[in-house]
Image: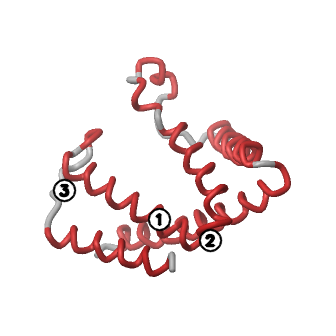
Amino acid sequence: MSLSLISLVVASVAVGGGIALQAAVNTALSRRVGTFEATLISVTITWLFIVILVLAGLRSGKLGMVTSTPPYLLIGGFLGAAILITAITAVPRLGTAGLIASFIVGQLIVAMLLDHFGAFGLRHIPITPVRIAGAVLLLIGMRLVLR
């Protein structure tokens, strides 16, 4: 494995930890201000942070192209809101680890399908028995975490 690939894996693991922390913190915030209000606060802070980065010159594309982008490519905002709302409402019952285990299983199943079909221009990576075994092991792990 190359050093750049290792760096991406390490960064992804660190951000994965941040996702768990975000769920716990947003749940605590929701107890003070409400579920949708906590979601709004989180999304607003995210938006402001990205605006600051863009204004600081950290750009990687052409924002003006959004007007000619197919509408289905804009679903990410709705998915982000669904993720936040689900996290805030599920953590009190599932726990942070249960939520994250459930998220990971859902992410892996959908990711395997997206890869398999090369959706959205992704590289085609077929579903194989080994990949299915990995998904089954994650499902078993989720069940164990939810006990």
Q: Do labels 2 and 3 touch, CB within 8 Å?
A: no
**Does label 2 or label 3 sit earlier along the sequence?**
2
Task: Rate crowding at label 1 as few (under 14), some (14 to 19) or many (20 or more) other CA atoms within 10 Å.
Answer: some
Q: Secondary structure at mark 2?
A: helix
Residue 101 falls left or right of residue 96: left
Q: Residues within 10 Å of mark 2 (few under 14, many from 20)?
A: some
Residue type indicated by callout 3: Ile
Real-space Cα separation, disc 2 to disc 3, in angstroms:
33 Å
The dot on residue 28 is none
Residue at 51 percent of width and 75 percent of height: 146
Image quadrant occupied by the N terminus: bottom left
Q: Position of residue 120 (x, y in %)?
A: 29, 39
Give how far apart the Cα atoms at labels 3 and 1 are. 23 Å
67 vs 78, nearest the viewer: 78
Disc marking residue 125? 3
Amino acid on which disc 1 is placed = Ser
Q: Dot 3 surroundings within 10 Å: few (below 14), some, or many (20 or more)? A: few
Q: Which residue is mark 1?
A: 102
Q: Amino acid at mark 2?
A: Gly
Name the foreground residue: 79 vs 3.
79
Please report the residue visible at 25 percent of the width from the left and 52 percent of the height from the top: 113
- Dot 2 corresponds to which residue? 95
What secondary structure is found at the residue carrying circle 3?
Answer: loop
